Image (cartoon, helix red, strand yellow):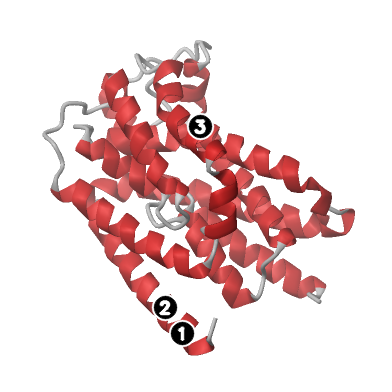
Amino acid sequence: MYSIMQNILTAVVQGIIEGLTEFLPVSSTGHLILTGELLNFTGDKADTFEIIIQLGAILAVAVIYWRRILSLLGVNTGTTGSMAQEREIPNQAPGRLNLLHVILACLPAMVLGLVLHSFITSYLFSAYTVLVGLVLGGVFMLIGERSQKPVLTDGIDQLTYRQAIYIGLFQCLALWPGFSRSGATIAGGLLSGVSYRAATNFSFLIAIPMMVAASGYELLKSYQTLTSSDAVFFITGFLVAFVVALFAVITFLKLLERFKLAPFAYYRFVLAAVFLVYLVATGN
């Protein structure tokens, strides 16, 4: 049995990992599954905990993009914002992007995820399938970067409905744990003629309804595992994930044009190789 201090340490570690990886193109689900193996933290409680800390990461993005979100909902924030401002402060440029773009991008993965949910949870949530997802996702990111189409959409407000659908279709690839939702959507955006900055901002925006829907669905199924004795454990993970994700997203947006996707892809290959050696060595 975990002691109180072990619980808190696990909550902090997993919260940090969730916050760092949820919106980076490295797969938060993959990292949580692999670190769960290392910490011997698996089972129903671990699954519910992952849902809670994902909600913390979602809240961080909602805070960063709050003006944009209100604009999508038809609320006038009194800020028009220029393209230059958008590059520095992503929530300051409400404009032509509307809810239909978001719906078109989210619908394919939501429908496919609902249809394949039982198969995915039964067969794809293992350490080895995550390693496969890490490699395949990294390969796709390199393809997206090296085969990038000429930029037709430099800012998020120039995004077309067709591009939103394309990005949504690429997002379906992330239903395989380890593939990375942000990696699939950003690379998909590049293949659709969208700039790095616009693809990343749109990826983060559509993450909010996608993750709320997925987390809400899973939470309804597993809320029975929540007990008052675990309150400190869950709250700690939630708060840590929120704070870390807040800084991770802001930092990633600032560094994106310098580092692009390739370093994240290579990191995924190294991580997959290291964990493969670990799994083989431990007989897992």
Q: Amino acid at mark 2?
A: Leu
- Residue beneath disc 1: 280
- Residue beneath disc 2: 276
Residue 192 x/y as whole percent: 22, 33
- Residue beneath disc 3: 111
State the residue at coordinates (43%, 37%): 204
Label 3 crowding class (10 Å Cα cut-off): few <14, some 14-19, many 20+?
few
State the residue at coordinates (60%, 67%): 13
Query: Which of the two residues, 52 or 95, is positioned nearer the viewer here?
Result: 52
Label 1 crowding class (10 Å Cα cut-off): few <14, some 14-19, many 20+?
few
Q: Is residue 129 left or right of residue 236?
A: left
Give yes or no for contact between labels 3 and 1 (Cβ–Cβ under 8 Å). no
Under circle 1, the secondary element is: helix
Q: Is residue 84 left or right of residue 24?
A: left
First along the sequence among labels 3 and 1: 3
Q: Quadrant of the N terminus?
A: bottom right
Q: Amino acid at mark 1?
A: Val
Give yes or no for contact between labels 1 and 2 (Cβ–Cβ under 8 Å). yes
Q: Quadrant of the C terminus?
A: bottom right
Residue 149 image label:
none
Q: Is residue 227 left or right of residue 8?
A: right
Q: Amino acid at mark 3?
A: Val
As measured in the structure, the alpha-carbon distance from the residue carrying label 1 to the one carrying label 2 is: 6 Å
Seen from this angle, which residue lies furthest left?
A: 150
User: Taking the image as drawn, is residue 254 in sight?
Assistant: yes
Residue 39 x/y as whole percent: 63, 75
Under circle 3, the secondary element is: helix
